[in-house]
Image (spheres, coloured by chain):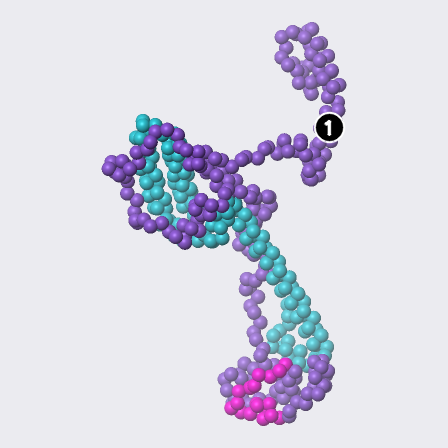
Amino acid sequence: MAEKFDNLEEHLEKFVENIRQLGIIVSDFQPSSQTGLNQKLNFMITGLQDIEKCRQQLHDINVPLEVFEYIDQGRNPQLYTKECLERALAKNEQVKGKIDTLTKFKSLLISELGKVFPEEMAKYKAIHGDDPPS
Amino acid sequence: MTEIFSTLFGQNDAQPPSGPAALGFAPGKPPPSMPPNQAPIAAQMPGQLGDDGPLLRKPGAMNEPFYLLRELPVGNDLTGNTNLITHYNLEHAYNKFCGKKVKEKLSNFLPELPGMIDCPGVQDGSSLRSLIEKPPVCGNSFSPLTGALLTGFRLHTGPLPEQYRLMHIQPPKKKSKHKHRHHHPQDPLPLETRTDPTKKKKKKDNEPERRKKKKDKKKKKNRHSPDHPGVTGSQPNSNSLR
């Protein structure tokens, strides 16, 4: 799994470095730099071809659209992961709280109903069995 | 029994009809949707429900005197009752991202990327969203540029105008934390680190004395060995051993 990403990362890094060098050549262009510029342009095309090849290995990878929003706003995309995990944990705790409360409510209700309707509750328990301790 | 139930649900006026026909429990008729306060009535007459009723009634008949009784959910279902972060082995990711402060800017995530990348992408039309919404019109393959095509990339000599020098602009880097601590000693710090500045202060208070001692030692040593290298002063015994 990680190899796929390493491969893409390597190609992207090479591509970025090539673009950086291209930028340096262009920023103060000299007639002698034309050959180098042509070479860099073709390197760029080769780099794009390499990145294109990585697509096949990564077709099963899904990226949430929200991550793109973070990047577009100049924010660290790791913040998205962080917020996702925090939200998941908070929701997990909420649901657990609800489940615990409802379990307590159920056992309380059964015990109270057992006091008022002992026969019916005996039948109910016969069908459902005794509730596991909450 | 019905009295208890009616008092429990606050419907003292309710007069339950008697007999299965009144309830719509005659053979061949499906059971009506009953309000919950009529449940004990059904409970009182378990034998009156006909065995030859429609199939819909069978589960209810099995669970007499209760109706609408469902099977309890299986206990091994994955619910919010379990810690899902632990269940999916995400503790490492949680500690990594939530344990410490994640830096806000994109340049902290991609420090090697040249150019000013912390600005919103909408400003210069470099946003990823625009790439998805309006994909560039191009061919399916990348082919190298031949000699004739490369003539289009012949550039004028000389430096680029200022407004196009985007590659050289880098986001400003923050100063080191040590300097900040010196400038703002009142910053909230963990207890362990809070003790350090006082120690440093004590050291600073004693500095003139220390310097005097150092000078004295230097003088003494110079008398014995004039070519001796510089002395640190903090470990006098170790120096004397040399």
Taking B194 as reference, is A68 above or below it?
below
Q: Nearer the viewer, residue B96 or B40?
A: B96
Shown colour of chain A:
cyan
Local secondary structure at mark 1: helix
Q: In the image, which residues are magenta?
A: B19-36
Question: Which amino acid, by three-letter code, is at mark 1?
Answer: Lys
Which residue occupies 63% across, 64% down?
A98
Name the spot of residue B241 as percent of width and height, x first: 67, 15
Mark 1: few, some, or many residues within 10 Å (few <14, many ≥20)? few
Among the chains pictured, the one given purple colouring is: B
Write down the quadrant of residue B182 in the picture.
Answer: top right
- Pointer 1: what residue? B201
Tell me if residue A89 comes above or below residue B196 in the rendering.
Answer: below
Q: Is residue B64 visible?
A: no
Q: Is residue B28 magenta?
A: yes
Q: Quadrant of residue A99?
A: bottom right
- Please identify the dominant SS of the magenta region: loop
Verify whether residue B178 appears in magenta: no
Which residue is depicted at the point 58% across and 71% down?
B72
Residue lying at the far left of the rendered structure: B148
Query: Residue A35 vs residue A85: left or right?
Result: left
Chain letter for mark 1: B
Would residue A112 appear left or right of A13 to someone viewing this image? right
Is residue A110 among what the camera can see? yes
Comparing B5 with B209, the one in front is B209
